[in-house]
Image: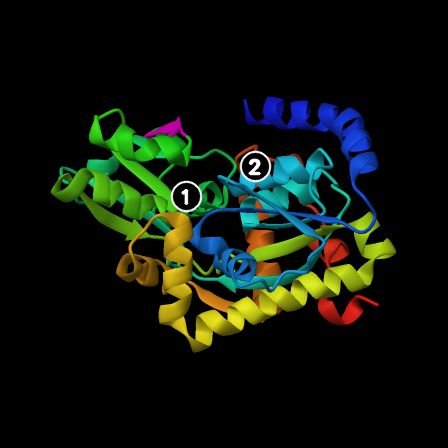
Amino acid sequence: MYKKFWTAVIMLTTLTGMMTGCQRQTDQIRLVFPQKVNYEPFIIARANGYLPDNVRVQTVTSGIHVAEAIMTGNADIAALGDGPAVMLMARRAPIKIITRYGQGERIHSMITNHSINNLDDLKGKRLGVQQGSSTHGGLLLWLRENHLTQDDIHIVPLSPLDMPDAMATGQIDAMVGSEPWPTHVETRCGDKVHRFTDFSGLGHTFPHVIVVREDLLQQHPQMVREVLSAIENAVNLINSQPDSAATITAGAIGLDTPKQKQCTDRLNWGVGWDESDIQSLNKTAELMQSFGKIEEIPDITKFIALKQQIQ
């Protein structure tokens, strides 16, 4: 199913990419990111006017939708998690990673109903997850580390938007996702659910990265530097004024400020790149290959063009 989806995306790339690529003016940048906690710097950069005037923003539900936009030529710069980023590299998308801006072992959480209290209780239960997402990759790693397989649970492919109602009506017994979806489920279901676990302790930092289409990077590096500078300013605000940052993001995401701050604190915010980022991306790629989500592991180093390399 997942391979068929990406085959369809590839087929669209030639036609849609050529058409939309021609429509983009050379002085305009199309920036795409999800309206989620993991993308807080982009929400703040937009709200505070940090982004250059020539940036046109489009928000989507998840990193999978961001990957679609990149593959079909509908985005020039985008932010996404490790799972969709690996998918793009495995499909040889014309992109470069210019930085990691956030990471954290506690990004992804599993919410279950109160009848599930241990691993044995989880077996055979219906667990909702968005296929191909960064959370999906984390789930595969978590299952392996806990000596479980996909056959031990019933995975239900589900949009995060549908998870609160699906949990409330008993269509699924558990869900996994990154914020704000776990918090939305808790808010919707109250004391019928509890936070079962997160994916910490797995030796994976779940880096979230900024990718740029190669043609924009080659033709307009100054534009790329300006967008990156805007995100750096937003990250600095998150770290220096967390209450103000949470208030800005809460309004965009739909959480109250205290809950938003709790979600924000589950990540470590910092623009940069180190060996742990490559190791984590490679671990995601290995998992996806072992579970048949990608055919081959990409050479991640070939897709990196860090800030100091952008001339």
Left or right: 231 as drawn, with respect to 227:
left
Tag shown at residue 51:
none
Tell me where residue 98 appears, x and y as whole percent.
69, 60
Tag shown at residue 139:
1
Q: Is residue 196 above or below residue 2?
A: below
Residue placed most toward the observer, 218 or 254: 254
Q: Residue at x 43, y 54 (%)?
A: 37
Q: What residue type is labelled 1?
A: Leu
Q: Mark 2 points at which residue?
A: 65
Left or right: 270 as drawn, with respect to 228:
left
Q: What's the magenta region?
A: 152-158
Query: Which-is-in-front pick, marks 2 and 1?
Result: 2
Coloration mode: rainbow
| Label 2 SS | helix
Q: What residue type is labelled 2?
A: His
The residue sitting at the bottom extreme is 240
Q: Which residue is drawn at 73% across and 59% down?
A: 304
